[in-house]
Amino acid sequence: MANPPIVPLVEYADALPEVRAVYDDIMATRKTDWINNFWKVLAHDPANLKRTWEALKVVMGPGALDPLTKELIYIAVSATNGCEYCTYSHTASARAKGMTDAMLMEVLAVAAKANETNRLANALRPPVDSQFLPKG
Amino acid sequence: MANPPIVPLVEYADALPEVRAVYDDIMATRKTDWINNFWKVLAHDPANLKRTWEALKVVMGPGALDPLTKELIYIAVSATNGCEYCTYSHTASARAKGMTDAMLMEVLAVAAKANETNRLANALRPPVDSQFLPKG
Amino acid sequence: MANPPIVPLVEYADALPEVRAVYDDIMATRKTDWINNFWKVLAHDPANLKRTWEALKVVMGPGALDPLTKELIYIAVSATNGCEYCTYSHTASARAKGMTDAMLMEVLAVAAKANETNRLANALRPPVDSQFLPKG
Amino acid sequence: MANPPIVPLVEYADALPEVRAVYDDIMATRKTDWINNFWKVLAHDPANLKRTWEALKVVMGPGALDPLTKELIYIAVSATNGCEYCTYSHTASARAKGMTDAMLMEVLAVAAKANETNRLANALRPPVDSQFLPKG
Amino acid sequence: MANPPIVPLVEYADALPEVRAVYDDIMATRKTDWINNFWKVLAHDPANLKRTWEALKVVMGPGALDPLTKELIYIAVSATNGCEYCTYSHTASARAKGMTDAMLMEVLAVAAKANETNRLANALRPPVDSQFLPKG
Amino acid sequence: MANPPIVPLVEYADALPEVRAVYDDIMATRKTDWINNFWKVLAHDPANLKRTWEALKVVMGPGALDPLTKELIYIAVSATNGCEYCTYSHTASARAKGMTDAMLMEVLAVAAKANETNRLANALRPPVDSQFLPKG
């Protein structure tokens, strides 16, 4: 059994009004009737809960990139950082947005390869080629 | 001025035949007439040069994901790991494949946000919701 | 000479009105007459510029912890992640808020020691002691 | 159930005299009658056990910074590195030294925000402002 | 109980021929009659399975460094990145190749110390001494 | 030109007696007549200078592993963490202890490969095989 969370989960029934308002917006936005545990621990800091949710809603929404591409990027970063919770939650989100197993395996192949070559470059210290430098 | 690379750059004129063969394939694949410095330092290990290039050519090529999406993922991981060389080289590659500044800024917003929430989850240790667990 | 930034610096004179509004708030809040380069590159995404600045203003302001303690934490994290820009900027901010050299050296001694013991624990995998588990 | 540790726990009854001496000092310093598992795995290298404990005792003790502030920094680094054991143990230590939930949530908000902006800076590569450079 | 893997384990009986071929080579190379779970999840991407296994077989084989030294390096990196699976699997591999507990504890002491001094250097930013620069 | 260090270099002529004593021991141990810049910045915290040097002298000295193997591990960790200073200094130290270019390239191939597979494992979350678990 996993260790308990560092702070207790704040359930809807016990939440402050400002926390409930965020929970309501999460469920309305996602068209679900439950709140995942990440928000229930973050709810101990209602201001950060609200700020993080509102930022995430915008950042992960449609823009120059589509929401599925953004979930793939989230998975790649979470794998790089070794965040177990985020790996499960964002893999689930990406699947809900249409990610196939083939897409998942390709994201991870790219992310893993980047982790490999990042270290070769950081260890061997090649100078950045002038062709790669942004034009002023 | 940047510090010199840890091992000298292996220029085409001085390269072993097996290194030249990789260099030739890089230039043919990319339709360019130059080799970037990452490969010129990796050339001190011709077997790894060949293996890394051949893997990268496949991993970054079209598949379930398109090559531009893969470059965006590479940028997100390289930013997470703080690899200066990779940041410049893959931003240039992504731009050559059609990445706009708006897309770049969105990739970074997503990657940065993932780095933020990864730490909130790793610090607060919420249990993974049963709804997120893969079905057996 | 350092490599140029990945995107050009957005100077006040050339900034969009919504960017200027953030720049004005940064200068008013800090009682300075200049904008540091971090914001000038982030300005290519005005919404993220505004969101990041407004979040940072709150997060780094007084609360249960004082602003200087928060700067020390920022330095510790930035050192852990190897962010050169952030190391210079937050060391300068912390000094402006009263950090002495003795305090800086202690922050770094603690952060470095945490980086050491984090790896011993992650490698040897001791079970979390029941005494450390939060009470339900 | 968690996986077993990589090396067995060295209990007091089975410990070498030099290990017992360190255990005794840990308990005397902390005014407790038990040893946490981190030390029990590290005890397989008695010299490193002694060195790490003695360094930690000094580094985490009072100085230019107070012990509670140092625990907060430890939490921030451990969250950044994703060390589960360290997160639980140092959160417990910090609480024993007076950390409230409000303080914990603020430490994490700062640490998470630093992780976010570290990546924006590492990806966009703004030059360090001359105003931030230490005076010679 | 640990959370289930993100993708199901691909058992030999259910594997595609190209996956079976890799599994057969893994067992023949290692002189074992079982496949560890890392390969069973990677098998969802048969091309990456084959590429990763074939690269690993070469990279971890004898060369300028012996296979045991290479396992020690793997442990040090896996501890630095906090990879639980890799820590268990490579510690087991290293033990099978002759690593004693004394050797394990020394690898970890070195890796942990490197993690500590890496942060002191990244925070204090000493210029690289000219004596350390490679000769052109 | 690199940015100046965060704190000035403490030169021998200006050093406190307890700093000089460490500098003297570094030069005597290494049989050199100069001190590298890492120690000159750390010297602002004489107690940490002394503690870090004395620990490093023991940890990097001969034991169950030889000093060259330990330098290789240091390089692998420093590359993983992206520490520029440490990469240059420990590559130079390893060369002085007999590391050839072939050995360097193999260390980096192993370290890079570990960084790659660490992420595949952290993303796909295979359960640790019972065969890999330490016997109680």
Image (cartoon, coloured by chain):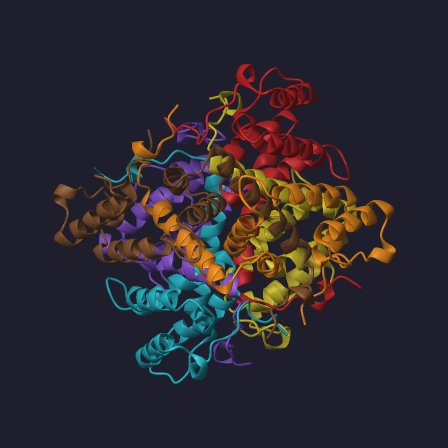
Chain colours: A orange, B brown, C red, D yellow, E cyan, F purple
User: Is residue F25 visible from the viewing direction of this image?
Assistant: no
Residue F64: where, in percent of width, then height? Answer: 38, 67
State which quadrant residue A3 falls in: bottom right
Relative side of D76 to B14, left or right: right
State which quadrant residue F68 falls in: bottom left
Residue B107: where, in percent of width, then height? Answer: 52, 42
Q: Residue at x 63, y 49 (%)?
A: B117
Residue E86: where, in percent of width, then height? Answer: 47, 66
Compared to A91, does E121 lie above or below?
above
Relative side of D64 to B9, left or right: right
Q: Nearer the viewer, residue A38 or F60?
A: A38
Relative side of F58 to D113, left or right: left
Q: Nearer the viewer, residue E132 or C102?
A: E132
Residue B74: where, in percent of width, then height? Answer: 43, 48
User: Is residue F50 visible from the viewing direction of this image?
Assistant: yes
Compared to E99, does D78 lie above or below?
above
Compared to A17, does C47 lie above or below?
above
Q: Nearer the viewer, residue C42 or C38?
A: C42
Compared to D128, does F25 lie above or below?
below
Q: Residue at x 69, y 22 (%)?
A: C29
Q: Residue at x 71, y 58 (%)?
A: A36
Q: Residue at x 68, y 19 (%)?
A: C28
Q: For the N terminus of chain D, which image quadrant?
A: bottom right
